[in-house]
Image (spheres, rainbow, N blue to C red):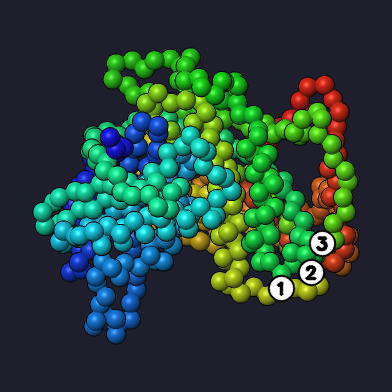
Amino acid sequence: MGRTYIVEETIGQYLSNLNLQGKSFVSGLLIGQCSSQKDYVILATRTPPKEENNENLKHPKDKVDNLDEEWATEHANQVSRMLPGGLLVLGVFIITTLEMGNDFQNTLRRLVFAVEKSMNKKRLWNFTEEEVSDRVTLHICSSTKKILCRTYDIHDPKSSAKPADWKYQNGLLTSWLSLECTVHINIHIPLSTTSVSYPLEKNTKNGLARWAKQIENGVYLINGQVKAEDCDLLEGQKKPRGNAQASSCSFDVRVLTQLLLNSDHRSTATVQICSGSVNLKGAVKCRAYIHSNKPKVKDAVQAVKRDILNTVADRCEILFEDLLLNEIPEKKDSEKEFHILPHRVFVPILGSTVMLCDYKFGDESAEEIRDHFIEMLDHRIQIEDLEIAEEINTAFLSSSMNSEAPLDNRDDEQPKEPMQTSIVLKIRQNMGMIAAFAVAVLAVGIAFHYFSD
């Protein structure tokens, strides 16, 4: 027996209305959430057509065998940034004018593996062994209306296709619980001279991986309480009256991170020769969603953790892309540079409490964000529905000739505007020494650093 996919009914209408515009096929992504028993699909979005020059338009390569994997995976990478915790790209769909043979199924198989591999490279977290590793391919023939749904195990490169059930259900968009938290971060990342040849992006990701372990090992309070992992998330909640949905529930999450791994852990001070350092400071708004069908605490906490990790990593990546795109020259004599990281913007899926997100620099207009949503997700949104979750502040840049880069930067110059709910990336360029001290504290019990209000 294969997996069952419960699909929002409006997706069926969306897929049937997709215009092939004279082409032999159109492809896209399926978005939703995995669970142990079944998967939920709440959104489908076509991959935007790739701009082609006039010569290619005269001789279009429109065969399915020529499906552009690189373009499709880039679309998946962009869309994955726009998903809050709990939501994933579950697979791919393709609509063709004719029924296809086994060669076509091999094309779909390569695509679903390429999409997952590309997204996995950017993650600061790994899937657990207990999680579902199946990803779906959906083929629809526009002439016969025949649907072929199959899954592949992405953890097994040699896996063969397994049949799956594709079932439409009305009202799926209203059956979700939301979790929200604000996480204050102050991450210091030394850039060692041995890794100076690496791109700044790679160095930063390596540093974030150490911080990610703190987030993974933290304690999560849900509405002020620590709950057992296998406990029902809705336990203790008042049951809704009449036809009211349990999905209207919203949970406040707070994060406590552990200072020590355990009381027996011993650390020694080390001195590392560095060419610079990166500091991330500020606060991030995080949101996660989980389906209301028997939700477990461990699933809710996992969704929040991954949203925290994703949003910080994504913002860094977006900033580095922006710096490269604008070709900002590096100042050799600069000791400090402040850059504002993009702010998170949320927008609701029509008819649902679930919100998707995007990232906005201070000089970008609401119209630009709206257009990006439309391009990536192929769904109309209203500007008035955009919710900027964090205040916009200006970045402060300063430079000086200081050869020392101490670990504790609390006395560093700060932006003139208060950075209440924004993140600042501070890049230090120097040829000094960084003393990175890890101090072992012996105490009874466990000490925690309180990250949120």
Are there few (<14), some (14-19), or many (20+) residues within 10 Å of tag 3?
Answer: many
- Identify which residue is drawn at 78% across, 61% down: 192
Q: Which mark is residue 330?
A: 1
- Pick the residue in front: 423 or 279: 279
The residue to which callout 2 is attached is 334
In three-dimensional space, the C-alpha distance between marks 2 and 1, rounded to whole angstroms, equals 8 Å
In three-dimensional space, the C-alpha distance between marks 3 and 1, rounded to whole angstroms, equals 17 Å
The residue to which callout 3 is attached is 274
Amino acid identity at mark 1 = Glu
Corner quadrant of residue 442: top right
- Identify which residue is drawn at 40% across, 32% down: 36
Q: Is residue 328 above or below residue 105?
A: below
Q: Is residue 442 above or below residue 2?
A: above
Q: State the SS at label 3.
A: strand
Q: Between tags 3 and 1, which lies in front?
A: 3
Are there few (<14), some (14-19), or many (20+) residues within 10 Å of tag 1?
Answer: few
Q: State the SS at label 1.
A: loop
- Pick the residue in front: 45 or 202: 202
Contact between labelled residues 1 and 2, with CB atoms less than 8 Å apart:
yes
Amino acid identity at mark 3 = Cys
